[in-house]
Amino acid sequence: SNHSMAVFKLLETVTFLNGRECKYLQERDATRKKVKDIGLQLSELHAAFDDYKNKYALQQKLVMDLEATETKLVEVVQERDTLLT
């Protein structure tokens, strides 16, 4: 009787610990999935930021080119006006 009671207690303890381990493994897997999702999000944000930086640099270049063209246009107009007078 004592042996069967000890076996029952042992089975009860093993079942309890197995349940705790299963819960831990589920939490671990859920956390790993969250980390993976956050990593993907971070990669997407890095790509979007790099794209933004490239577009911003292009925009800055276009603004500088426009300013240079406007300056050249003013010079050409002044030269034309000088030649016409």
Image: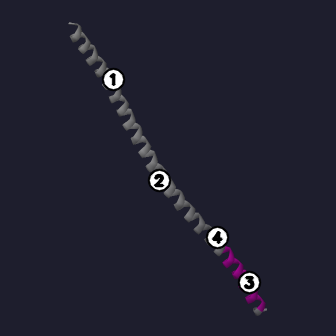
From mark 3 to mark 1, how far is it between C-alphas?
Answer: 86 Å
Amino acid marked by disc 2: Ser
**Disc 3 or 1, which lies upstream in sequence?**
1
User: Is tag 1's residue or tag 2's residue first in the polypeptide sequence?
Assistant: 1
Question: Between marks 3 and 2, how big is the CA–CA gap?
Answer: 48 Å
Q: Main secondary structure of the magenta part?
A: helix
Label 1 element class? helix
Looking at the image, residue 15 lies above or below residue 42: above
Locate the N terminus by quadrant: top left
| Residue occupying the far top of the picture | 1
In this rendering, which labeled residue sits more in front, label 4 or label 1? 1
Measuring 22% from the left and 11% from the top, which residue is drawn there? 3
- The residue that mark 2 highlights is 43
Q: Which residue is mark 4?
A: 63
Residue 28 in the magenta stretch? The answer is: no
Amino acid type at mark 3: Glu
Identified at 68% across, 77% down, the residue is 68
Mark 4–mark 1 Cα distance, whole angstroms, equals 68 Å
Front residue of this view, candidates 85 and 29: 29
Earlier in the chain: of badge 3 and badge 2, it is 2
**What secondary structure is marked by label 3?**
helix
